[in-house]
Every structure is written in structure tokens, then in C-alpha cells.
């Protein structure tokens, strides 16, 4: 259990680690998303630092090296809605925020818009479908990619309360067993990381173990949908690459785990990346960027989890300084607000019966 003696400054550092670590993974994977590993090697060799996308890239063209994308922007958006919603979750405001965000990025000339599940759900809501039903087919990784603020806000225990909050935020767009299990796994890993030394979860391995338990609970929520069991696939993917060299690990993830937008591919892939990287946030970002497929989302998830366990103070300063499109003061304020909610929940026992 997380104890009341936990230092708020340390918690904010780890919360910042989750958000900025995720941004590092997102930005490093931005130019390589949707490309094959062979095409990435042809264009860049191994990607080991921020690079600009090719001029003909389908979604990232025109972005400067180090620019964050939808993964980071939607995570920050969700975080602010969580803080402003109080004990509940304002689904109407959340859907409006997503629509406003898409209009804004279109105005900026971006091609990286709402993902398939989110877009389909919002179209349904606009057609009069209740939020509880709109997300019943959302099974891709959009919920998991932006769930970090829930992991920051919710203590790791009681786990049922954390999973319930994850499910609540998924309802409008990703209300399926697979998407909720995936997002619950990521949120639990981040929550354990933020808890730091007060629980065993401060270690990335223990955080990954807790993620498997959370995925099992998450799979019991939402509308059942067909697909591989997320908890089992995370556990399998971690074991598949454990002890392997980076190049061998990448090949195993690409060939066997998969790197597409399906939750049952990209989320287990992110946990496998965390395993190969040994919990190092920058290495997690680098490995993800070279996978091909949904590199920015896998990178955001893997490096975000690693960042929560390591803390912002241990992120590579030179790379953080090169991030573009990220207001660090805004991130710090959000991290502090989320941690304040976390401390209040932990102190009062609120949500213990959720």
C-alpha cells in the first residue's frame, strides 16, 4: 500500500516522468509511424535521436523533429478533464474537448487526427447515441495511449477503484473488454511507478506484474469483444523478449506480438519494449521508434510507464529540451493537480468500494 508519508515532490517528479517520458516516446516515433522496419532502416538507419519525417509521410509530413502528436496532446487533454470533473467524469465535456482538439489540429495542418474507435464513437454520439453505447465497438489503442493521467491520479490500491476510473473514462469511445483491459494495464503500471519506493511497484518489473492483474480486472468491464486476452498477451510478450538482445527483441515483437493499432498488439508490444529496455525511458522510446507500425503510440506507452518508474529527474535532459509542441509549465501544473487528487483519495479512502 502507498503510505501517507510519501513525499508529494517525489510523486510529482514521477508524474512528470510519466507525461514527459510518454512525450519522448511519442516524438521519437512520430516520423516512423506507419512505416515498415525495412523502410525505417532505409530512411534513417537505426533511429537513435529525434529526426524529421519524410516529405511524403502520410500523417507526419511537415512536422519538425521532436514534435509530439495526438498521443501526448490527448493525454494532457484527458488529464485536465479528469481534474475538472471532480469525483465523476464529464463525458459530454470530454467528447466536446476531443472534437475541439481535432478542429484545432486540422487548422494547424496536421494529418494525425482522431483514431478509428474515437472517431466512430463521436460520430455516433453526434447522431444521438448515448455515450454508454457509442463506445461499444472501440477496441483499438486510443484509450491506452492517453490513459497516463488516470494512473497518476489514482493510487495503486484499491486496484478496483483504479480500474473503475479507467473504465469510466473509456465509456464514450472504448467501452470494450479489450480496450479497458489494455488501458487498465497501462494505468496500473503508471500508478505503481508514481507510488515509488512506498510500494514494490516503484520498480518497473513489479509495475508490469501489477499491470497484468489490472488487465484481468479490466477485461470484466465493458462490452465483450473478440480478441486475444490482454493480460495473457502482456505476460507472454514480456517472457518472449526477456534476456534477448535489442535486435532480437525487436524482431520478435514485429514478427510475433505485432505493432498495429489493435490493442492486443500494441499494448503487449509496449510491455515487451519496457522489458527489453530494462525500464530505461529513453531506450524504450528508441526501441519503439524502430519497430515500425504504430511506433509513436507504442513509444508513448512504453516510455511513459518507464518514466513513471524512473521519474522526471532521471529523464535525459538533452532530449527533453528538444521536444516541440509541449508546454512544460502546463505539464508540471497538470502533474501537480493530478497528484493532489491522488493524495486526497489516498488520505480519505475515497473510491475504496468502487
Image: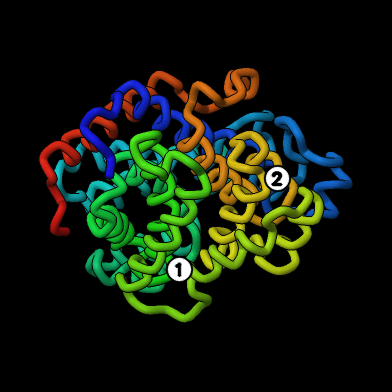
Figure check: 116 above or below 50: below
Q: Secondary structure at mark 2?
A: helix
Of residues 254 and 138, the one nearer the viewer is 254
- State the image quarter where residue 342 is shown: top left
Name which residue lies at 51% across and 71% down.
Answer: 232
Figure quadrant of residue 68? top right
Q: Which residue is identified by label 2? A: 287
Instruction: Say left or right for 283 vs 112.
Output: right
Is residue 50 at all visible to an observer of this figure?
yes
- Image vertical order of residue 77 relative to residue 36, above or below: above
Identify the residue shown where x is 85% and y is 43%. 43
Q: Looking at the picture, does residue 245 appear above or below residue 8?
A: below
- Could you tell me which residue is drawn at 47 percent across and 49 percent down? 206
**Front-most of 287 and 27?**
287
Q: Is residue 42 left or right of residue 193?
A: right
Q: Quadrant of residue 153?
A: top left
Instruction: Choose mark 2 or mark 1, whichever is in front.
Output: 2
**Residue 308 % position (x, y):** 46, 37
Q: Secondary structure at mark 1?
A: loop
Badge 2 or badge 1: first in the primary sequence: 1
- Residue 311 location (% of width, % of height): 47, 29
Q: Position of residue 173 (x, y in %)?
A: 36, 61
Q: Which residue is mark 1?
A: 139
- Which corner quadrant holds the N terminus? top left
Amino acid at each position: 500500500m502507498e503510505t501517507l508519508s510519501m513525499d508529494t515532490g517525489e510523486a510529482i517528479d514521477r508524474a512528470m516522468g510519466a507525461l514527459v517520458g510518454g512525450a519522448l516516446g511519442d516524438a521519437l516515433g512520430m516520423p516512423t509511424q506507419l512505416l515498415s522496419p525495412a523502410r525505417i532502416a532505409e530512411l534513417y538507419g537505426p533511429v537513435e535521436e529525434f529526426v524529421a519525417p519524410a516529405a511524403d509521410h502520410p500523417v507526419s509530413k511537415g512536422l519538425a523533429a521532436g514534435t509530439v502528436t495526438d498521443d501526448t496532446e490527448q493525454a494532457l487533454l484527458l488529464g485536465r478533464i479528469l481534474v475538472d470533473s471532480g469525483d465523476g467524469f464529464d463525458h459530454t465535456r470530454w467528447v466536446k474537448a476531443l472534437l475541439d482538439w481535432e478542429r484545432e489540429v486540422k487548422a494547424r495542418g496536421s494529418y494525425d487526427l482522431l483514431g478509428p474507435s474515437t472517431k466512430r464513437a463521436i460520430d455516433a454520439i453526434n447522431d444521438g447515441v448515448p455515450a454508454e453505447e457509442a463506445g461499444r465497438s472501440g477496441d483499438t489503442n486510443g484509450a491506452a495511449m492517453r490513459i497516463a493521467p488516470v494512473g497518476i491520479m489514482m493510487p495503486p490500491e484499491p486496484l478496483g477503484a483504479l480500474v473503475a476510473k479507467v473504465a469510466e473514462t473509456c465509456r464514450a469511445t472504448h467501452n470494450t473488454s479489450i480496450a479497458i483491459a489494455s488501458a487498465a494495464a497501462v494505468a496500473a503500471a503508471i500508478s505503481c511507478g508514481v507510488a515509488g519506493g512506498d510500494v514494490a511497484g516503484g520498480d518497473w518489473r513489479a509495475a508490469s506484474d501489477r499491470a497484468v492483474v489490472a488487465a484481468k480486472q479490466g477485461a470484466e468491464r465493458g462490452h465483450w469483444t473478440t480478441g486475444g486476452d490482454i493480460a495473457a498477451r502482456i505476460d507472454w510478450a514480456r517472457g518472449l523478449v526477456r534476456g534477448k538482445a535489442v535486435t532480437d527483441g525487436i524482431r520478435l515483437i514485429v514478427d510475433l506480438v505485432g505493432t498495429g493499432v489493435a490493442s492486443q498488439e500494441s499494448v503487449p508490444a509496449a510491455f515487451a519494449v519496457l522489458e527489453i529496455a530494462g525500464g530505461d525511458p529513453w531506450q524504450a522510446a528508441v526501441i519503439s521508434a524502430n519497430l515500425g507500425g504504430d511506433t509513436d503510440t507504442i513509444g508513448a506507452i512504453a516510455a511513459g510507464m518507464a518514466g513513471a518508474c524512473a521519474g522526471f529527474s532521471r529523464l535525459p535532459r538533452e532530449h527533453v529540451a528538444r521536444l516541440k509542441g509541449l508546454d512544460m509549465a502546463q505539464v508540471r501544473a497538470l502533474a501537480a493537480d493530478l497528484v493532489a487528487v491522488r493524495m486526497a483519495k489516498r488520505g480519505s479512502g475515497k473510491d475504496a468500494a468502487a
